[in-house]
Amino acid sequence: MNWPLFAGLAVAFTVLDASFMQVFRVGAAWPSLTPALVAFVAMWAPRSTVLWAALLAGLLGDLATPIPASDLSVIRVPGPQALGWMFGAAAILAMRRSLLRGHPAAVATSTLALLLLAALVWGAIWSARGLWPETEMPWPPGGGLLALRTRALDAGASAIAALPLAWLLARIRPWWGFPGPVWALPGSGRRP
Amino acid sequence: MAFTGRSRTPLIPAIAVAVMALLPPAWLGWAGEVGAVLWIPLQPAAHALTEMRLWLRPPDRDRTEGLGDGPRDEVDGLRAVVARLRLELEQAKAEIAALEGAARPEVAPAPPLAAAVVTVDRSRIFRINRGSRHGVAPGDVVVEGGGTLAGRVAEPVGAAWADVIPPERGGSVRARLFDASGTVGELLLIEPGSEGWQGEVDAGPPRTGSRVRLDDPSWPAAAQGLLLGSVEGENPVEQRPLRTRLAIASPLGVDRGGTVLVWRCGVPTATEPEAPR
């Protein structure tokens, strides 16, 4: 895989997610682009490359996400998103052979699955972190399910945002250097 | 080589990240530093994108704009009260210092500092483009739209950036309810998720449209009296007929405005005594 291309797009999409994607917010649903990038890579790249890509992109997002540690300080926790995306990417790897990988809808569906699974990992890690008495949870007391619902709405919005992005990424698929025939482009159906 | 297609699954890095994810907060200061360093080259792009976002979709404005001049007069009056209380507080501090025989360092009042919101996180923490280089310190109060409390500067503060924690992330705050006739009562506001503030008061006349202002000793004196929101709805409390639950709508919402004012309190709040009630 073309790692410089992935790194450049991951950084650009992380900045877009933090600064711009709010413009597409509908109610509590807030789309992101970076998960769609991971889902796209998970469609085509070798297994270990996919897991590395998900881990690194998630780690970048974790380090860009401030979490209140108390009333007067914020921390960044590396891991909840990185491990969640890695888990989600592993799930995509398991099901990608049954998908029409070249179709944008497949990337959108995979983005939805990735983020829903990642939300579960995120909630599990934060629940475990709650064992530290000084930890301030990212949801109010009793609001864990509400936080998961918000994440599920985000996942839906991100899946919709993934449709045009997947189409654009597929246009530059030859640049990615994925193994396999280059003719397996959008619309060509399953990869042999 | 780890980054090639033939390498193994990144199991060891994943385990290392899992361990990091479970470290106690006190051991994660380095992650904030790494995140800050990573963010430095991205800040100009983030700022430009925020400007574009605000141009494309301006933030939701004060939902109580149509109330007329009454609330604005109220704001002016309360600002005067705040200014008077701040003066009294400074005087009281000087008297305490004199009584304790300690030489209190002179803190020159700093003028408010305009700052631009660079990024807004899902957790509603937002970053401004002013930092320690500009005199911003942890605990400084951040105000939007003239008199609406936007949050408090969090630690750590970078040279040219600072993260701001909005009041709703603090769990609960004490506030005071005002209508056109003046103070209606005190209430404790809680924020159950993304539903907005909620607070309970004694049942009485309709409070819809009344304004809610901060009155919490855990916040700096400069923040007392600032607007938190207005009453949007009233519901009876189950099994407590004499109480009413108020739903408070914040005029800020998730769409923080493009520009805020930082009220530099002079000293970090952590070392500041409690404000008078």
Image: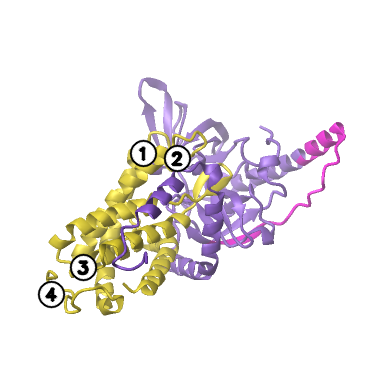
Chain colours: A yellow, B purple
- The answer to whether the residues at label 1 and label 2 have Cβ atoms under 8 Å apart is yes
Q: Position of residue B55 (x, y in %)?
A: 45, 68
Q: Nearer the viewer, mark 4 or mark 2?
A: 4
User: What residue did someone put label 3 on?
Assistant: A104
Q: Residue at x 68, y 61 (%)?
A: B133
Please give the range of residues in magenta. Answer: B90-117
Quarter holding residue B191:
top left
- Residues flagged by tags 1 and 2 on a common chain: yes
* SS at mark 2 in the image: loop
Is residue B92 on the magenta stretch? Answer: yes
Mark before the other along the chain sequence, 1 or 3: 3
Q: Residue at image x 56%, y 56%?
A: B33
Q: Are marks 4 and 2 on the same chain?
A: yes
- Residue at the spot of label 4: A188
Which chain does the residue under circle 1 lie in?
A
Question: Quick check: marks 4 and 3 in contact, CB under 8 Å?
Answer: no
Q: Looking at the rendered structure, which numbered label has been put on residue A137?
A: 2
* Left or right: residue A118 compared with residue A108: right
Q: Report whether mark 1 lies on the same chain as mark 3.
A: yes
Q: In which quarter of the image is the N terminus of chain B?
A: bottom left
Which quarter of the figure is the C terminus of chain B placed in? top right
Q: Distance between the residues labelled 4 and 2?
A: 46 Å
Circle 3 Cα neighbour tier, 10 Å, few/some/many (<14 / 14–19 / ≥20): many
Circle 2 marks a residue in which chain? A
